[in-house]
């Protein structure tokens, strides 16, 4: 055990702890993770608003963020497939990260050529969608890199990794994200020109890939052993195993539609698709239980020799390990009840923040703040507040536990929304805006650090990308698909921003009540991890 893996004590030790190379690498990669949200988030909202688009159109345009909610559908490929040339040169994780960063930069250059008076929103939407896909895939690789860089015996260090990720994310989203607003107000640049500069910044952020070191894991060996097992199972029960990839594909399609198509299906249609997901998941679990009860040798011939493995068995086994085993292992290890409870909590925890975040820039502009004020207070001030409380929150979480961190952050999250409600009543009050931004930054940082540390502990190292992406996608669902209704909700309330923010406060309460019911299970998970660290 090294000093860098022990919980720090005192300022000097804490400084050395947070400045170790692996945590600084996580910070730089966190910047690359947060930056695309500027491209298709705050800057895009301001560009659309100044181009005369309606609030509803701006809100629905944010539906491209649904890619963050469904990126777990292709996350198994990031675990199993290597990017040609790049992975051989940089390593598995870093190769994927650089590939996605190049895709984001090229898409941003393409978006800079859009003129909303001459091009349809569909064209801009498709380009923004490509940025979202590359960015969501980059997040898969970065999150897997972060978890793999911290040893399994260092579970408490996941809080520090979460803090550095959050700090880096907000450094890009708030710090770099303020640049477009200053350029818009003080230089007179068009948004097209600004987006060309933003594409160059994306290329500069790739420095994190070169600074980082590829983590060493036994992921490939574990996946290989599992695949060998399923090859024998496929040889023993070829018809049953052949149905698993089919069920898996049907399940993935149903989940994707339930996540990304709910605004078109309506509530009744969406609930129907959720029912389809539950039925398919239950069927898949039943087949898995049946298969795992089978010995990997023939039961009929009486021979102990393994059955011959054919090409079809290898393909079936690869598909099962890639698509299905990450989900199956998650439920087996945690138990169905606790696994479902965690996924439900992950969904509920960020709903209130989702509605607030998507409309915040539009709210600031309509209340009467200038773009420069928005850049200064909602970006630059919030940036430093988030970094400060991310580090403080991670330190406290390592000492007091994840559950307390979640309760502190969640309760403050609800209170911070009330300040925005008051701001809507008073008008463009800079002191009140500053108070709201500081409080919001504190709540976002503290709750996110504890939240990310929790779901990081739940991921198995053999399927890090797949399992973390599943939980992160569900968490992002509230910020994307549900958040796309935020503009429509403001319109429904006839522009009553005060009532809107009051409703976002109430949205936080169910998640806190649910957290109370599962607090003992989470505390036990964290305790068991700390015991493994001590031994």
Image (cartoon, rainbow, N blue to C red):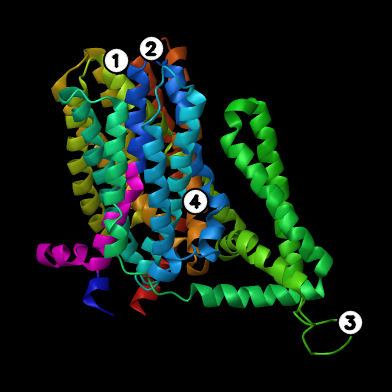
* Range covered by the magenta-colored residues: 7-35
Q: Residue at x 62, y 38 (%)?
A: 258
Q: Earlier in the sequence, mark 3 or mark 1?
A: 3
Q: CA distance from mark 4 to mark 2?
A: 34 Å
Q: Label 3, on which residue? A: 300
Secondary element at tag 3: loop
Horizontal side of 324 relative to 515 (left or right) equals right
298 vs 232, left or right, is: right
Q: Residue at x 48, y 23 (%)?
A: 121
Ranked by sequence position, the earlier of labels 2 and 3 is 3
Q: Are marks 1 and 2 in contact (CB under 8 Å)?
A: yes
Placement of 67 over or under 520, stated as above or below: above
Question: Which image quarter holds the N terminus?
Answer: bottom left
Q: Quadrant of residue 207?
A: bottom left
Is residue 18 part of the magenta span, yes or no?
yes
User: Residue at label 2?
Assistant: 495
Label 2 Cα neighbours within 10 Å, binned few <14 / some 14-19 / many ≥20: some
Between residue 291 and residue 10, name the one nearer to us: 291
Real-space Cα separation, disc 1 to disc 4, in angstroms:
35 Å
Measured in 3D between alpha carbons, the distance from the residue under mark 2 to the one under mark 3, in whole angstroms, is 72 Å
| Furthest residue toward left | 12
Front residue of 325/332: it is 325
At 47% from the left and 13% from the top, the residue drawn is 492
For disc 1, the marked residue is 366
Instruction: Kindly check if marks 3 and 1 are in contact, taking CB atoms under 8 A apart as contact.
Output: no
Residue occupied by mark 4: 471
Which quadrant of the figure contains the C terminus?
Answer: bottom left
- Rendered residue at 42%/52% (across/down): 100
State the image coordinates of residue 331 (x, y, percent, origin top left): 59, 60
């Amino acid at each position: 055990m090294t000093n860098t893996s022990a919980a720090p004590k005192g300022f000097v030790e804490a400084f050395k702890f947070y400045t170790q190379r692996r945590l600084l690498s996580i910070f730089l990669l966190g910047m690359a993770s947060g930056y695309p949200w500027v491209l298709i988030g705050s800057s895009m909202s301001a560009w659309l608003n100044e181009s005369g688009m309606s609030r509803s159109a701006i809100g629905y345009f944010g539906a491209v963020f649904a890619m963050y909610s469904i990126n777990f559908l292709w996350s198994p490929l990031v675990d199993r497939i290597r990017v040609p040339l790049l992975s051989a040169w940089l390593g598995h994780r870093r190769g994927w990260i650089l590939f996605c960063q190049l895709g984001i930069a090229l898409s941003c250059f393409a978006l800079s050529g859009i003129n909303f008076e001459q091009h349809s929103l569909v064209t801009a939407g498709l380009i923004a969608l490509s940025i979202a896909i590359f960015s969501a895939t980059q997040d898969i690789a970065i999150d897997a890199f972060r978890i793999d860089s911290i040893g399994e015996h260092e579970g408490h260090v996941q809080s520090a990794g979460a803090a550095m990720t959050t700090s880096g994310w907000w450094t890009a989203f708030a710090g770099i994200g303020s640049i477009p607003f200053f350029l818009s107000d003080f230089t007179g640049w068009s948004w097209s020109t600004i987006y060309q500069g933003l594409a160059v910044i994306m290329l500069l952020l790739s420095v994190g890939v070169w600074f980082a070191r590829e983590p060493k894991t036994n992921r490939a060996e574990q996946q290989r052993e599992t695949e060998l097992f399923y090859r024998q199972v496929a040889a023993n029960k070829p018809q049953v195993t052949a149905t698993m990839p089919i069920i898996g594909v049907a399940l993935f399609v149903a989940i994707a539609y339930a996540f990304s198509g709910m605004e078109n299906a309506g509530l009744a249609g969406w609930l129907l698709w959720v029912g389809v997901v539950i039925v398919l998941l239950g069927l898949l679990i039943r087949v898995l239980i049946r298969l795992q009860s089978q010995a990997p040798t023939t039961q009929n011939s009486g021979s102990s020799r393994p059955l011959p493995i054919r090409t079809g068995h290898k393909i079936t086994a690869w598909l099962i390990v890639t698509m299905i085993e990450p989900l199956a292992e998650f439920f087996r290890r945690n138990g169905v009840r606790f696994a479902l409870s965690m996924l439900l909590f992950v969904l509920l925890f960020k709903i209130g923040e989702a509605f607030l975040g998507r409309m915040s820039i539009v709210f600031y502009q309509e209340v009467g703040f200038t773009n420069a004020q928005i850049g200064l207070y909602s970006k630059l001030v919030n940036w430093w507040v988030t970094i400060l409380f991310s580090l403080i929150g991670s330190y406290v979480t390592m000492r007091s536990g994840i559950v307390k961190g979640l309760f502190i952050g969640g309760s403050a999250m609800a209170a911070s929304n009330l300040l925005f409600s008051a701001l809507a009543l008073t008008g463009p009050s800079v002191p009140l805006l500053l108070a709201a931004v500081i409080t919001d930054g504190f709540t976002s940082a503290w709750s996110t650090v504890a939240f990310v540390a929790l779901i990081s502990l739940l991921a198995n190292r053999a399927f890090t990308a797949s399992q973390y992406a599943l939980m992160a996608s569900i968490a992002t669902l509230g910020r994307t698909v549900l958040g796309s209704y935020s503009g429509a909700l403001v319109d429904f309330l006839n522009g009553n921003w005060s009532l809107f923010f009051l409703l976002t406060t109430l949205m936080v309460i169910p998640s806190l009540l649910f957290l109370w019911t599962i607090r003992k299970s989470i505390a036990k998970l964290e305790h068991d991890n700390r015991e493994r660290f001590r031994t």
